[in-house]
Image (spheres, rainbow, N blue to C red):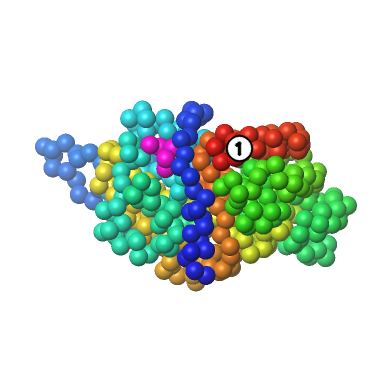
Amino acid sequence: MSHSKRLLFLLFSVFTIGAIVLTACGGAATTAAPAATQAPAATQAPAAAKKLEIFSWWTAGGEADGLNAMFDIYKAANPGVEIINATVAGGAGTNAKAVLATRLTGGDPPDSFQLHAGLEVEKYSPDQYLQPLDDLYASEGLEKVFPKDLLSLLKYQGHYWGVPVNIHRANVLWYNKQIFADNNLKPPTTFDEFFTVAEALKAKGIVPLVLGTKEGWESGHTFETILIGTLGAEAYKGLWTGKTQWTDPGVTQALETYKKMLTYANTDHSALTWSEGAQYLVDGKGAMHIMGDWTDGWFTSKSYKGYGWAPVPGNAGIFDALSDSFALAKNPPHADEATAWLKVAGSKAGQEAFNPKKGSICARTDCDLSLFNDYLKSAAGDWQKDAIVPSVTHGAAAIESWATAYKDAMALFATSGDVAATQAALQQACVDAKTCK
Ligand code: GAL
């Protein structure tokens, strides 16, 4: 597929003036530096240990494993540096983004931090708080190893602000293969098939659809895939440019479909995170789970191999995409160590260590695919041939304030089920973002 197709991913990027709200504080876990091999002279004070603080929201299995694998590559190349692994739990950066904004504006930046490629960077006022990475891109030859569309997405105000480590897919239907085989079922390709399958599973006392909506973003994640499956790639993209109205009957239909799907979901979903929801599949208690492919990393971390994957109904041939990058704070406490970190993040070795565990494909185009499992090999193929659409829940489709209003409306919908009120709220969010009238 040509790069121009994936450039569409960029076309829906608009700059954000995000409200910064402090919602939580994060803990930091430290990874001890390797012991010094040489004792300091008796008369000298020991040299201060070199440090590097990396900020992310990667705490779940798979996510944490991937990050640690990249840390290992870093430590091998930079012995004696103590890595401070500053994580703030909460999928999709629910809590981390607010904590990060407060740290940046408060003059207490981590050295380097997780940032979705594209839109989030504006939220952090890059000219004030971030260091452009153009020199690093030049010294490491990064423009030659990332897809052009991704490079465009990463450029803001003429500069690169993050080094991308991966490409994630958001619109995956994970299922328990044994349950499907035992019940002679096939993964549903349409919403009608979904409801037929769900009825059959329900009759057997199996939870058809597993959700975890505890953190407030997961309902929006699920619904964006239903919007894609209902409207198709072009009309879905149009929602973020004003070409498709949120008053469209297709949006009503998607809300009705989601409402009906929720009647087949686990009743405890509001108490569960995404990974606690996925545990239903591992335990053989739930049949299907809609989530991004960090779930593949999480399953792998559990040594669980009984899962199958398919596009969410109606999503065949469409890749709902996002990318994680690492940014550099302006005047970071440990500048040299941070630059060395970004080199690892952009390197082939770093990405080959990180992505098979994280459940994502490399942002680089030259990774060795044989290192990846069957799911990730299939995702790499789909990335090449599918229509690419931007994920709103993970920063790619809309300005931050709009994405937040969208997520909040959909979190409420998961309990209210009020189609008319939710569609009005979604329309208002588009108006507030100055995309709809
Ligand atoms: C996304 C992020 C992924 C994964 C997921 C769940 O926003 O890009 O890397 O961490 O959240 O936390």
Number of numbered discs visible in the structure rendering: 1
Q: Is residue 413 above or below residue 389?
A: above
Q: Residue at x 67, y 43 (%)?
A: 246
Is 214 left or right of 346, judged from the image as shown? right
Whether residue 383 is visible here, answered yes or no, is: yes
Can residue 281 be seen in this snapshot? Answer: no
> Circle 1: is it few (<14), some (14-19), or many (20+) Cα within 10 Å?
few
Along the line of sight, the residue nearer the viewer: 55 or 154: 154
Q: Nearer the viewer, residue 94 or 284?
A: 94
- Does the beta carbon at disc 1 come under 8 Å from ligand 1? no
Instruction: Report if residue 416 lies within the magenta region.
Output: no
Q: Position of residue 359 (x, y in %)?
A: 54, 57
- Side (left or right) of 227 relative to 116: right
Give the side of residue 144 with respect to residue 295, left or right: left
In percent of width and height, residue 300 lies at 58, 58
> Residue placed at 69% from the left, 35% from the top?
424
Residue 8 versus residue 417 in the image, above or below: below
Three-letter amino acid code of the residue under disc 1: Lys
Drawn side of residue 434 relative to residue 411, left or right: left
Res. 169 image quadrant: bottom right
Residue located farthest toward the right when viewing the structure as drawn: 203
Q: Quadrant of residue 410?
A: top right
Q: Which residue is mark 1?
A: 437
Residue that extends furthest to the front in the rendered view of this protein: 437
Which residue is drawn at the image coordinates 38% and 37% (left, top)?
125
Of 262 and 182, which appears nearest the observer? 262
For the record, the magenta segment spans 121-125
Above or below: residue 87 compared with residue 143: above
Dominant SS in magenta: helix
Q: Looking at this view, is 120 or 205 the one in front?
A: 120
